[in-house]
Image (cartoon, helix red, strand yellow):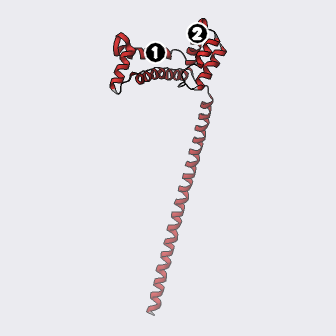
């Protein structure tokens, strides 16, 4: 008889354990479902925000570039030309390191020395930033056409050193032909 009572008691404990286990599993499943719904709605909200951002970016991308942007590009280009002049002068100086920089600035500055060289490069950048490179190129071609013929200028373009790439020669000739 003891054995039956113990067996019934063990079965009762197992049944209570199973009921508790089922109830807690149901509570966990409900929590997971509600969390899943919350995450799904948050994902949908973020997806809509992303779509709106992409649409706004597409609208901004279609807008023409502003005059400020074009002016900034011209300023960067104009700063590059004095830089190329400076690098060319450094390479031609025959010196290395700080001596090359000092000698180049002193040479560019003439009687004003290094400060004159720095001032010349800054002045050149300022002047070039006021107009675009294309405008400057057209003005040079127009001025050359006042004293030389198109064929003479074309010959000078052809006789430029080979270090200057062919595409620049072609652009220079096209600019000459358009004037």
Q: Residue at x 59, y 47 (%)?
A: 44
The residue mark sitting in front, 2 or 1, is: 2
* Residue carrying label 2: 144
- 152 shown above or below 100: above
Q: Quadrant of the C terminus?
A: top right
Instruction: Tell me the distance, in whole angstroms, between the alpha carbons under discs 2 and 1.
Output: 20 Å
Q: Residue 45's spot in the image, x, y percent?
A: 57, 45
The one nearer the camera, 29 or 123, is: 123
**Which of the labelled discs sits on residue 124, or is there none?**
1
Q: Residue 109's spot in the image, x, y percent?
A: 38, 13
The picture quadrant where one finds residue 30 is: bottom right
Q: Quadrant of the N terminus?
A: bottom left
Q: Residue at x 60, y 26 (%)?
A: 167
Q: Residue 165's spot in the image, x, y percent?
A: 56, 26
Q: Is residue 174 left or right of residue 97?
A: right
* Residue reaching furthest to the top: 147
N-terminal of the two: label 2 or label 1? 1
Q: Residue at x 55, y 14 (%)?
A: 136
């Amino acid at each position: 008889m003891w054995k039956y009572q113990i067996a019934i008691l063990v079965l009762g404990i197992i049944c209570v354990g199973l009921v508790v286990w089922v109830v807690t599993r149901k509570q966990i499943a409900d929590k997971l479902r509600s969390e899943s719904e919350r995450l799904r709605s948050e994902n949908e909200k973020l997806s809509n925000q992303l779509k709106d951002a992409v649409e706004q970016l597409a609208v901004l991308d279609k807008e023409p570039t502003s005059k400020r942007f074009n002016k900034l590009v011209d300023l960067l280009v104009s700063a590059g030309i004095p830089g190329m002049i400076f690098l060319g002068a450094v390479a031609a100086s025959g010196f290395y390191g700080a001596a090359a920089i000092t000698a180049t600035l002193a040479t560019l500055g003439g009687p004003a020395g290094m400060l004159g060289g720095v001032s010349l490069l800054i002045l050149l950048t300022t002047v070039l930033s006021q107009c675009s490179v294309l405008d400057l190129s057209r003005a040079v071609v127009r001025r050359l056409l006042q004293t030389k013929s198109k064929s003479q200028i074309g010959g000078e373009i052809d006789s430029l050193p080979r270090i200057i790439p062919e595409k620049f020669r072609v652009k220079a000739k096209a600019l000459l032909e358009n004037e």
